[in-house]
Image (cartoon, rainbow, N blue to C red):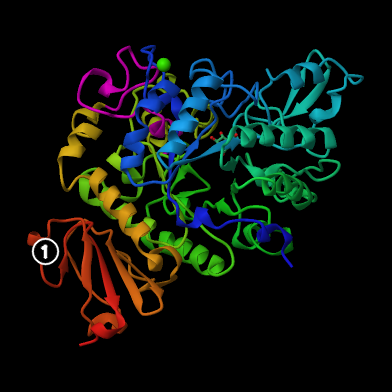
Amino acid sequence: MDSFTDSKKDWYKRMSFYQIWVRSFADGNGDGIGDLYGVYDKLEYIQSLGVDGIWFSPIYPSPNADYGYDISDYKDIHPDFGTLDQFKKVLNRAHALGLKVIMDLVVNHTSDEHPWFIESRKGKDNPYSDYYFWRDKPNNWESLFEGKAWEYDPVRKQYYLHIFAKKQPDLNMDNPKVREEVKSIMRFWLDMGVDGFREDVINFISKKEGLPNGIPFLPAVNGMPHYKDGPHIHEYMAEFRQVCNEYDCFQLGEGPMTTVKSALKYLTGPTKSLDMMFSFDHMMADCIYTEYVHRPFSLVKLKKAFTKWQKALDGRGWNALYLENHDHPRIISRYGSEHFWRESGTMLAASYIFQQGTPFVYQGQEIGMTNIRLLSIDDYIDVSSKTNYHTYHLKDSVEDRLKRIHVSSRDSSRTPMQWDDSPNAGFSTAKPWFFVNSNYKRVNVAAEEKDKYSILNFYRRCLALRKSSKTLIYGTYSEYFPKDKELYIYERVLGNESYLIICSFSRISHRLKFPDKYAKRRGKLVLCNYPVEERRKGRLRPFETRVYRYRKHTVK
Ligand code: GLC
Ligand code: CA
C-alpha cells in the first residue's frame, strides 16, 4: 500500500499556475527592481488569467550569483523584494482571491555567503564542517555553470564541490543535520500557510559515496551519473514527504535530465515522494541539452517528447505542463515565429494547456514576450550565458558567438514584464535593473487587454476551457499523425466526451485533416485562434489552432 498518497489530496490536478520571477515582474516602490509590493498590486491581474496558484521563484536573501538560486537565508525575504510581513500580506491576499502559493525550495546548494558555509569553511572542527563536500583532492567533475566543479577555499585550505556556480556550494545531504535543516525550512513556510514547494534540481541531492570520477572528456555533465538519482535519493525524499504529509500541500520537483523511468519512481509506488515533476525532453526539440547547442526545431521531436510523457504517466503519475520558465528563452522565438507572433503565441498555448497535467504559465508568456538580442556579452547577466560565451567555440566570430547567446540565454525570460507602452513598459517609474525588450510598445498587457484576439485573452480562454471540463483535466490522451511535420493533433477522452486539439506549426496555409475516427463526426468548434468568420473550409491558416468537442450521440 502506498502510505504517501493516502493522505494526499488531488486538488493540484485541477489547478493551473502562474510563475513569478519577482525581480522582473512589477516594481512597487520605484527603485527599478520588481518586488512584493508590485506583486501585491498585480494579484487581481493574476487571478483574472484564470489560474489557481502562484509559484514564486526564490525570493529569499541572495547575493544573486544565480539570481536567487544562491540563497543566503532560507527563512527571510530579500530586502530588494520587501519583508516577511509584506510576504504574509501577499500570501493572505492571494488566498483570499482563491490562489494557492508555492515556494521554491533550493536545497541542493546554498550561497557561499550562507552562514552555514561561512562556518563550514572555518575548519574541520566546526559544527558545520560536514554541511558541504570538502576534499583535499578534487575529482574530475565539471560544473554545469562555471568550469570545474571544485573550488579551492584558501580559508579551509580544501576544495569544495559546486555542481552549479562557484558561489553555489553543494550541501551534503548525507549529513542528517542538513536534512533536519531542510525539514525545518519546509515547516517554516508551511506553518506560515504556503501550499507547497517547487523543489529545485531535486534529483541531484544525493551523491554517490566517495564521489568517484566521472566520464573523462565530457564537458559540464561528466559527473552526472554520480549525482543524478543518487543512491539515497528516495530515502531523503521520503523524509521530506513526511513533513509535507503533516500539511495539506503538494510537492513538485524539478528533474533536469530526468527520464520517464526515473521520474516514475518519484511519482508512483512505494517511493512516491513528489506529486509532479518538471521534465525536460520537450524543451529539447531545437537543442541538445541546453539551448546553447542549437539545432533546427523539429515538431516531430517535440510531439514524441509530449506523447512519451503523456502515455507513461497516464493513470499513474501526473504531469507538470510548461513551455517557459526563468531558465529558457521565450517559446515564440523558439517553437513559434516572431513574424506570426500572435498566431504562433496562441497556438503554442493550446499545444500544451490541454494535455493531461497541471499547466504552468510563466510571467510574460501570456502576452507573448519574445527573446531579447543584446549587442554585447557584457550586457548579459546570467552566469551560464557568460560561461558559454567565454568557454565554447572560441574560434568563431564574435557575431556567431553572440548569435548563440541570442537563441540560448536565460536572460530572455528575465527582462522586465511589459505592462503598458509607457516608459519602462510600466514596470517601474525608475530605470529598470535590466533591459526592457524593445517590442514593449506592441507587446504589453494594456494593449492586449483591449484586443479580443490577443495572446493574453487566448490564454484566458484556454485556461477557462480547461478548468470547465473534466475531460480536459482527467481524460486520456492520444496523439494522431505522429510523423506529420507540420501538424500536432491530440485528443482527450473521458466517457462519452472527447476533445480534439489541432495545432498547425506551419508558416503557410495547410490542409486540415482529421483522424479517421472523427472524419464523419460533427464536433463543436469550442476554440480557435483566428476570428471564426475568417475560417476557411478544409484549410488551416498559418499557426492556426482549433479545439473541437465531440459527444457520442453526435455521430451523423
Ligand atoms: C534550477 C533553476 C535554475 C538554477 C539551477 C541551480 O535549474 O531553475 O534557475 O540556476 O537550478 O539552482
Ligand atoms: Ca522595487
538 sits to left or right of 498? left
Q: Position of residue 541 (x, y in %)?
A: 16, 60
Name the residue rendered at 79%, 24% in the picture: 159
Say which element carries label 1: loop
Q: Is residue 234 magenta?
A: no
Residue 196 against residue 355 in the figure, above or below: above
Q: Is residue 431 magenta?
A: yes
Q: Is residue 340 visible?
A: no
Ligand 2 shows up in the quarter that is top left
Q: Position of residue 502 (x, y in %)?
A: 28, 66
Name the residue rendered at 65%, 45% in the picture: 247
Q: Which residue is mark 1?
A: 535
Name the residue rendered at 63%, 56% in the picture: 8
Q: Residue furthest bottom?
A: 556
Q: Position of residue 112 (x, y in %)?
A: 69, 21
Q: Nearer the viewer, residue 415 or 525?
A: 525
Q: Main secondary structure of the magenta part?
A: loop
Residue range corresponding to the magenta coloring:
408-437
Q: Nearer the viewer, residue 95 or 106?
A: 95
Q: Quadrant of residue 485?
A: bottom left
Residue 443 against residue 261 in the figure, above or below: above
Name the residue rendered at 57%, 52% in the picture: 277
